[in-house]
Amino acid sequence: MSNSIDFSGRPFHFIGIGGIGMSALAYVLTKRQLPVSGSDLRPNHITHKLESLGAHIFSRQEASNLEFFLPEVATDAVTSPEQLSVVKTTWPQVICSTAINANNLEYKAALELGCPIWHRSDVLAALIADYYSIGVAGTHGKTTTSSMIGYMLVQAGLDPTILVGGEVKAWEGNARMGSSRYLVAEADESDGSLVKHAPEIGIITNIELDHPDHYESLEEVVDTFQTFAQGCKTLVGSIDCETVRERLKPSISYSLYPDKGADYTVTNIDYRADGTTALVWEKGKALGLLNLQLLSHHNLSNSLAAVAVGRFLGLEFGEIAKGIATFEGARRRFEFRGEAAGITFIDDYAHHPSEIRATLAAARLQARPGQRVVAIFQPHRYTRTLTFLEEFAASFTHADLVVLTDIYSAGEPDLGQVSGEDLATAISKHNPQVVYQPTLPLVSEFLLQNLRLGDLALFLGAGNLNQAIPELITTMSEPAIATS
């Protein structure tokens, strides 16, 4: 079995190719004119796009899928050692995510055939090593920050390759193939695979415990980030996060507070309903005004990371500011989904207490006087809900109404330790305006009956809650039927 990723022409087969991380890798490999196939039980717009680029997509996960790129000799009787050698070296490199278990038919077949089997993080690590790479890590904000940096470099004419964990309108997806030496990648810590990445420039936005299904303590999370930091030639970090400041000591720092002595900071901040403006400083020297379309302090912090990277790469501040000013954000990051019956619908991926508080702060900025902020939340994973039950309970205090549904398992077993109803009870101690609706149809029914003219309906969570939004908008947009 090969001990390194082969980018010379050997096929790749992705088990679960439609996932946000897997599909980004498949996109880049396909654009590099490499043979790519993959399977996914739920075809979507991402798999359709990959098919249009030349990837072959199977809608079922079967052992025979691995034979797609075999030469004709593989289907005939193999009569010589030379033929057997050809067959073995043309079995695909099989790519899996953490979600693929040992009972998957394709995975079992790949083991039996001796195919090289890689985790998706191995492919990303190999791509990071193949470019002058910028890797964005952190518990929160990495999708927005990596997307913003990528967009800034595109606007500056540096033509980067980009792989992020969300879809971005500017390149119509979660990946972009550039022609330069630069690569911008979102680096995920959720399963510990962050330690494999060694980019030229590493960014750490913040560090918290967010995945108790993988980590037992914050100390374990810090260990993972420290290993990542050691592999980066230059480390950029937010010293507004005490853990980053004290445990990682980045070589280039940024902060929203001038008194912290960061390399990059801001003054004259104006948080508005239509965006944010601030004066940016570099080591005590004013660089100029930065205008963002994005809301609230967490996105201003993300933009400082982009400024630091741009300046390190030699960009003039004017180029940086021009790019950032037109960045619209990634999908499911305070994404406007539409308006119906005078109600504004916003979709956000927030699934951790810190993210919920930040997103509700942004909603408050956008809300007009007298406008209700209605937070509709689907908890994500039993382990996360149980671990952070009290933190979740206190994170909705600024919502006028909280509508809670049951926990999205993300494949975890329900051990009966916590439920959505338990979280609703906990929230009610901080905000009595909470309603529990156990299923998505009941959530939709409740919202149809209880949303009011002028409400800002904020859908929160990393699961499938946002699937309810289009039907709600359609139903509320229909003219009322007169009755006699």
Image (cartoon, rainbow, N blue to C red):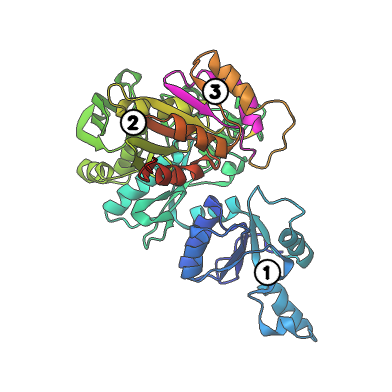
Label 3 crowd bin: few (<14), some (14–19), many (20+), radius 10 Å = many
Q: Identify the amino acid type marked 2.
A: Leu
**Residue at 42% across, 27% down:** 374
Of residue 246 and residue 390, the one placed in the foreground of this image is 390
| Nearest to the observer: residue 349 or residue 92 | 349
In the rendered view, would you say 352 is above or below 188? above
Vertical placement of residue 376 versus 146, above or below: above
Residue 227 at what x, y percent from top left?
57, 37
Among the two numbered marks 3 and 1 on one chain, the one whose residue lies closer to the N terminus: 1
Quadrant of the image for the C terminus?
Answer: top left
Q: Which residue is mark 1?
A: 65
Residue plotted at (51% across, 18% down): 394
Pick whichever, 423 or 34, lies toward us. Answer: 423
Q: Is residue 246 above or below residue 98?
A: above
| Residue type of the residue flagged with mark 3 | Phe
Provide residue 154's location: percent of width, then percent of height.
Answer: 31, 53
Q: For mark 2, what is the residue?
A: 453
> Residue drawn at (53%, 51%), measured in percent from left and top?
21
Residue 23 position (above or below residue 354): below
Query: Is the N terminus in the top left, top right, bottom left or bottom right quadrant?
Result: bottom right
Q: The residue tagged with tag 1: helix, strand or loop?
A: helix
Distance between the alpha carbons at the discs numbered 1 and 2: 52 Å
Residue 269, horizontal then vertical, whole percent = 25, 25
Left or right of residue 298, residue 33 in this image: right
* Extent of the magenta region: 382-409
Q: Which label sits in the foreground, 1 or 2?
A: 2
Whether residue 263 is visible to the viewer of this picture, yes or no, is no
